[in-house]
Amino acid sequence: LRKGPESPWMPIVAEQVSFVDPPARLFFAEGWMLGLPFSAFHRYVGPDATFRVKVASLVTLVDAKGAEMNRSETVTLFNDMCLLAPATLVDRGIAWEETGPREVRAAFANEGNTVSAVLAFDDSGALVDFVSDDRSRTTDGRTHERCRWSTPVLGWQMLDGYRLPARAEAVWGDPASAFAYARFEILDVEYDTGDEPG
């Protein structure tokens, strides 16, 4: 992770747990910033989302909540569905519109929050980018700036029998001002499909 285009990269380890019915997302990351340990926690359950960042488990740097966070985390949840669980995209809460030969626009509604994104695919049909103008950037939890947000996929892999992104970025800004603030590599995945006996 990094805070801005001139900021140094901070290595993190993240764990995410997502649910389908009803949709929910829990994302917890730990790393080091300026020589101090920090943690970041995104929580999106029901219609409400929060985002908290703490340093040394004591000082809260970011405590974000409210309508901006709710909409922003709805975008993130939909992004996760597209990248990590595409079977969930067969949903009455999603409206699709073809906008080009390898591009579609989707509107996703969840718990009163409605967002949209453009999905781009390569010649093989693999998702290569997800772009939304419905996510807001905050560095302090109090001020929010609506920014273009995208997650270009830099490759795909087979992991534990599932086809998943090998590497991806999270990018703020339109093409003229865009910068990657996060780079991800999926190391492990586990799905609970409800098909297991017991």
Image (tube, rainbow, N blue to C red):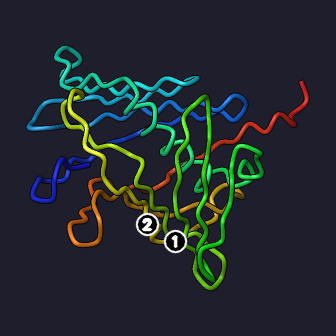
- In the rendered view, does 12 fall on the left or right side of 4? right
Residue furthest to the right in view is 197
Q: How many marks?
A: 2
Return the disc, 1 or 2, that comes first in the chain's sequence: 1
- Name the secondary structure under disc 1: strand
- In the rendered view, does 158 fall on the left or right side of 66? right
Expressed as whole percent of the image width and height from the top left, the position of residue 90 reads 77, 52
Where is 164 relative to 145, above or below?
Answer: below
- Name the secondary structure under disc 2: loop
- In the rendered view, does 161 fall on the left or right side of 128? right
Query: What residue lies at 29% left-to-right and 71% top-to-bottom?
Result: 175
Mark 1 neighbour class, 10 Å CA radius: few under 14, some 14 to 19, many 20 or more: some
Query: What residue lies at 43% left-to-right and 60% top-to-bottom?
Result: 151
Query: What residue lies at 25% left-to-right and 43% top-to-bottom?
Result: 145
Expressed as whole percent of the image width and height from the top left, the position of residue 188 reads 55, 48
Residue 128, numbered circle? 1
Where is 18 relative to 54, above or below?
Answer: below
- Report how far apart the C-alphas of labels 1 and 2 lie in the structure: 6 Å
Q: Amino acid at mark 2?
A: Pro
Mark 2 neighbour class, 10 Å CA radius: few under 14, some 14 to 19, many 20 or more: many
Expressed as whole percent of the image width and height from the top left, the position of residue 105 reads 58, 63
Residue located beneath label 2 in the image: 152
Expressed as whole percent of the image width and height from the top left, the position of residue 127 reads 58, 69
Where is 122 relative to 155, above or below?
Answer: below
Residue furthest to the top in view is 58
**For the residues bearing labels 1 and 2, Cβ distance under 8 angstroms:** yes
Return the residue nearer the eye: 126 or 155: 126
Q: Quadrant of residue 46?
A: top right
Q: Quadrant of residue 40?
A: top left
* Picture quarter with the C terminus: top right
Q: Amino acid at mark 1?
A: Val
